[in-house]
Amino acid sequence: MEGVKLDRWGYEVKTSSDSCISSINAYYHQLLSYGRYRRVILEAAVHDKDCVLANILAAHFLCSSDPSKAPSHMEAAKSRLEQATSYEKAVFEALNYLISSNTDDDVAVELHSKLLRDFPRDLVSLKRAQVLCFYMGRPDLSLGLVQQVLPQNQQENYIYGMLAFPLLELGRMADAENAAKKGFEINKQDFWAQHALCHVLQYECCYKEAVQFMEECSSSWSLCSSFMLTHNWWHVALCYLEGHSPIIKVREVYDHHIWKELERIDAVCAEVYLNALGLLLRVYVRGELDVFEDRLKILAACLTDQANWFMEWHLDVLILWALAFTKELSKAEDLLKGLKFRLSTMSKKKQQGMQGAMLLAEAIYEYGQGNEKRALEILGPDFNAYNCKIIGASDEQLDVFYEVWCSMLLNTGEVTKAIESIEKQIQKREGAPFLWRLLEKGYSLSGRKEAATVGEKARALEAAYFN
């Protein structure tokens, strides 16, 4: 058809410009490979200012990177919608709703599900829908979407990493491992499949194997976004930490692979801060923060800049801890007030879902100040860190809030409750030394003679992985 070209998926796009299609396909690649140059979609709209697909994808990209410039692309897409192909109209419908204010997440997911029923090879729309599910805390929906399109994408690049992640979040580790391995076989530089394999190894307490695998893969990460690059190194650092490697090794990863990313001219600072904070809180819970000297103070000074606030709920919770801990209390209070205001502007349905996230934010603010009893009161007697996925965090990222909770229980005399929880967690991850150390502390505080045996088990595990 004249004036119509096929994109990477083989779907029709109304444009006469080869350069426009080339830029759209490059954008697809950047998104699926967690690349650094997602701005390439803006070039597509320059090559063909009337292309609906180029403009709606550019509008969606700009909503997070440069919101003031998004409306012009949205209007350009709307003005040519009648001439667009059926595929472009479907993408427009899904993205137009997603971009609009006060969206219902369930409706947004359903629109993407409808799009994928009609155009199942569009893995970028699948990825976008999975990200939405992640921020809803709904790995079940995410898995359903990828399973919906899997028959049409059996040997497709990136599909198996996208299958593996929701399986991980649903605790289906063997299935996740199989999917991640298949994705890695198809493409050794599928960073999401690499990441999923690391998750599996880490969960199974194969810390040394996880580090070896990720460090072998790391030479290909330089083209990754700030998030993916530093997040993969966060996993490496965490494996060293959990496997009880000398703490200096963890600090080296922080300095040379996480913080160092900020030296790059195109670094996205907030993405680096998220992984830096997630690591430092883990280090703090283990009583090792002194080895990091003034690094948390330097990081907290960056986080007083409100430009880094209200981007990710998970990041905001970690920022609250850092600001409170470093005595930047007025800034921490401003951030907390801002979160409460944002909660108040949400729909009633969304507010209900975010209540747990708000309580976690308030509790971590108190924890940062050393008010552990108050933090526990806020969380309530039935707190479960793994029910807080809606902050935009994986189970592995939520582990630290579980550790904080257990530590606070032990420190405030709620020893029986702590022991009961830690014993259950050890049944899932028997090879994790820090869990045994927490249990040893619980047993010691309650005067149980098994404390010595548990301590020996912890020491044996601490020596098992990197020594």
Image: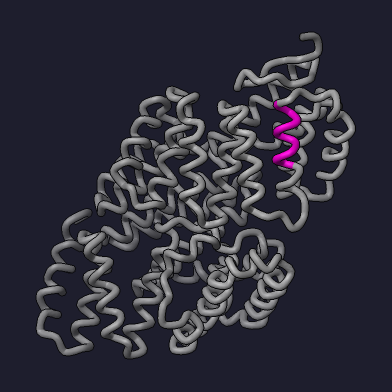
Q: Is residue 446 covered in magenta?
A: no
Q: Position of residue 462 (x, y in %)?
A: 20, 63
Q: Is residue 92 covered in magenta?
A: yes
Can residue 311 be seen at all in this image of the molecule?
A: yes
Q: Position of residue 256 (x, y in %)?
A: 46, 51
Q: Quadrant of the N terminus?
A: top right
431 relative to 411, above or below: above
Residue 144 shown left or right of residue 204 in the figure: right
Figure coloring: one colour
Residue 311, quarter of the rendered image:
bottom right
Give me the residue at 57% from left, 55% from top: 135
Name the foreground residue: 363 vs 135. 135
Give me the residue at 46% from left, 49% from top: 140
Give me the residue at 30% from left, 53% from top: 203
The residue sitting at the top extreme is 2
Q: Main secondary structure of the magenta part?
A: helix
Can residue 29 be seen at all in this image of the molecule?
A: no
Q: Position of residue 84 (x, y in %)?
A: 80, 25
Q: Quadrant of the C terminus?
A: bottom left
Give me the residue at 63% from left, 77% from top: 332
Instruction: Specify the segment rendered in magenta.
Output: 87-95
Residue 181 shown left or right of residue 423 in the figure: right
Q: Position of residue 204 (x, y in %)?
A: 26, 52
Residue 451 shown left or right of residue 438 in the figure: left
Name the foreground residue: 221 vs 55. 55
